[in-house]
Image: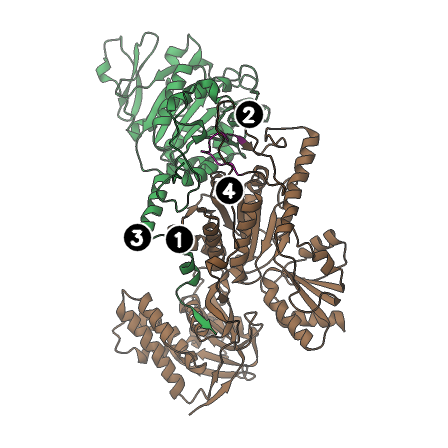
Chain colours: A green, B brown
Amino acid sequence: MEAKKMFESDLFTVLEKADAVIPDYSSKDFSSDQDVRWCPGCGDYTILKQVQNLMPKLGINREDMVFISGIGCSSRFPYYMNTYGMHSIHGRAPAIASGLKAIRPDLSVWIISGDGDSLSIGTNHFTHLLRRNFNVNLLLFNNEIYGLTKGQYSPTSHEGSVTKSTPVGSIDHPFNPLAVALGSDGTFVARAMDRDPKFLQDMLERSWKHKGTSMLEIYQNCIVFNDGAFEMFTDKKSRPVETIYLEQGKPLIFGDNNDKGIRLDGLKPQVVDLNDGNYSQDDLWIHDEQDAIKAYILARFFDDPHRDGHLPRPFGVFYDVQRPTYDDLLNQQVQSVISQKGKGDLDELLRGSETWEIR
Amino acid sequence: MKNKIIKDEVTIRFAGDSGDGMQLTGSQFTNTTALVGNDLSTFPDFPAEIRAPAGTVPGVSGFQIHFGSKPIYTPGDQCDVLVAMNAAALKANLSNLRPGGVIIANTSGFDKRNLGLAKYEDVNPLEDESLKGYELYAVDISKLTKESLNDSGLSSKDVERCKNMFVLGALYWMYSRPLEPTISFLERKFAKHPEVADANIKALKDGHTFGEATEIFSVRYEIQQAQLPAGKYRNITGNKATVLGLVAAAQKARLPLFYGSYPITPASDILHGLAALKNYGVRTYQAEDEIAAVTSAIGAAFGGNLAVTGSSGPGIALKGEAIGLATMLELPMVILNVQRSGPSTGMPTKTEQADLLQAFYGRNGECPIAIVAARSPSDSFMMAYEACRIALTHMIPVLFLSDGYLGNGSEPWRFPQSEDLPAIKVSFDAPRHGDDLDPYKPYVRDENYVRPWAIPGTQGLAHRVGGLEKQNETGNVSYDPQNHELMTKLREAKRDKIADDIPLQDVDNGSDHGRLLVLSWGSTYGTIKSAVQQSRGDGYDVSHVHLRYLSPFPRNLEYLLKGFDKILVPEINNGQLIKVIRDTYLIPAIGFNKIQGIPFHVGEVKAKIRELLD
């Protein structure tokens, strides 16, 4: 087998990689031998299944996939994937993934994290990952509660949440994860939920296809400590009026019989009735994944009663733009220095510029 | 013709305001001194602030060089010559000047304003009797420089900036050094501003001529070539030697080098040095914080690079949890700690060796890692190299200890040839092929208790690692009580087994048994070596053992320690190695400690040796 360098700028062959034929995988090939140990009914099961369903479609070897997690219920995820994986320490998965991707752009790197992991202890790494735009995928399982430590409020819990550590209600103003991601100059920002598996599958695929950091927030129901947190988005009755599904180039329409829409009054979103004769579809906001300002306004559809009033919750791709990735830039820089200066000679380095000899 | 006196060693301290270019002056004097073949040792003494108020004592920047025709092990306890560019520089450094020493003072730095800023009130120390115990040369260097550069066309501010070169020229005359190395340095440095280069070179030459012509200086000195072992030498600082050690190890292991770091004094120069070596397969990553610096390195280690992170004490504290993760993952990683005075922010620009116990114990749980420590600026090369070799060969985090004194200090280095460096053999676990493979077992160990390095992308080796306790061999999560005890013991046994792979401890000076052993580690080497050598010369039965491998200790250390009646452990801390030594070998060692942010003086150690033997 001919040793192949993983990328041009490598001075040394770290790994021999053959032009392997990609096996004809099924989703089962991505299950590890470990028993899955989440609470019965946990939303994590669906997410795991959808990820395992997606993997065979990617056309890459499972050995070229790495799942890296922090700490929390969701962070058990890598143990259940028959790929390379690392269950690391609280909040640090983005930083570990950054180091790995910096030196191994050949790998498909997935970060599995939760609302506590990414938006409390690891917020620093979360934001810096997004601004650097490493070509990795980040799945943020948001259940608006600390599950593994048994039921304290999280940085995404609503004000007033009554939990073990907030017996008379939380006074913490919650993070709006998508607004944080957009504020960090993320290049791909999307939202899905566990109880809409097909749509989740689509969003996972869109995340994978995006080159750069893909941030997919997944609303995930914690059946034990925060059951029903997202029920209004999944319940058959409330769902049509409480959710809005985003489609590129399409108007923002929702409601029981698609009878409502969103128009922009300046920069202010306004819910309009399409049946009252005042507005037609032509008046509505057309979704544009490349528009950063509109993406931010959409991210603010977040039920902050202090300012926004009540708006349906958007699901789908809020923002998707291209920007050079850190891993590409780093390796291009290494490559360009090598082509300017030539491959470094160790003896020249040890000698330095000024020497003298003692005989 | 003036008198020429031959001396075998001299210590000069250049001191001035932060803006006076003393570091540059000192490093140029060092460079030239190295090129003429003297042995030397330097110590830069930076102010804590980047630009403290000009003219004040906190704004004084110093650079000390000790050079000679005999072996030089320290930057010198006290200086023979103090160059004071202003009143504050005199005030801050006079206590370092030996009685009868030479003061070269720039009189225009002692005007009313400067005297006030240095809090000399209204008395000019150059004019009263306070310096009568010294040999004082009061010269208006600013004025002489101005006259020298009358026709340069430079602004008066730029002319003023050349006064350090005038002083340097005068000292080159006084100590019989050539001007050419500095001239060619100035031509390179100011290649884009030839008028500035010309002015600096003229100031340098006129300073030299001034030394020759003036009647103020009556003698000049000659320091002959040192009798160093034959070979090719260069001058090097500890931080630069560390950079070279890491790169050399990566090249010999045939691995790319990844360095994750967050800027911190006094370790940042290592980041700067490595960032400039991309063509050696080096990737540097300036992370968002210390934790991201170490965890990015863990990611790189998982991916198959030689992974290194570096910091100083406060940063190492932040990295603690992640070092624990690397210990559990059993991945190779090198952690550099260029120690500074602590705790907390402490005194960032001052040296201390007070992070040894942090290196041993500063993590949660039973978390054995390997520890090595450099003993001199140039030894940083070999110990950084060794840290990498041990990490890669034994799949373990290795902590490399240096400190501000070593990192910024410099000395001549007989640099090695790459072919003479010890081999570092790294092999990743081989791919497995087939449809019906058993799950891969990442924690099966070899005879040294070392697990294989199985990197992503390798066929048939897909596996999961993590910070949760591992089942022996399979690496699966395990809460089994017996297994946890087994794994804890295995991780420790793996660290201890490294003792088979490091040199036996040598005795630096003296016999392997006797009345008194001085046991030291880290940057105190040169001082203690000098103190022991001189005490032995005075007839004292004292030996010196200096540790470079601290965890595990060399196998014969216990034998050596038990051969002496008394053991003295001098440290620039409140007693740390001594605790480990007492605990490990149950011997009543005696501590000798200095916690002032500055190194020992040879005299202090000699006095302690005498106290114990007289």
Choose between B242 and B156: the one closer to the eye: B242
Asked if the magenta segment contains residue B457, the reply would be: yes
Residues at discs 3 and 4 both on one chain = no
Q: CA distance from mark 3 to mark 4?
A: 31 Å
- The answer to whether tags 1 and 3 share a subunit is no
> What is the x, y in percent for residue A92?
50, 36
Q: Which range of residues does the magenta coloring cover?
A: B453-464
Question: The disc labelled 3 sits on which kind of residue?
Answer: Gln
Q: Position of residue A259 (x, y in %)?
A: 30, 9
From the image, tell me which residue sits under label 1: B277
Q: Quadrant of the N terminus of chain A?
A: top left
Total numbered circles: 4
Up/down of B446 relative to B154, above or below: above
**Mark 2 Cα within 10 Å, few/some/many (few <14, many 20+)?**
few
**Residue at mark 3: chain:** A
Is disc 3 placed on a helix, strand or loop?
helix
Tag 3–tag 4 contact (CB < 8 Å): no
Q: For the point 49% across and 83% down, which residue is it?
A: B136
Query: In 3D space, how far apart are the residues under numbered discs 1 and 4 (Cα atoms)?
Result: 24 Å
The residue under label 4 is B427
Label 1 to label 2: alpha-carbon separation: 43 Å
Q: Residue furthest bottom?
A: B1
Residue A176 falls left or right of residue B485: left
Q: Give B159 or A24, whichever is nearer the viewer.
A: A24
Does label 2 lie on the same chain as label 3? no
Nearer the observer, disc 3 or disc 2? 2
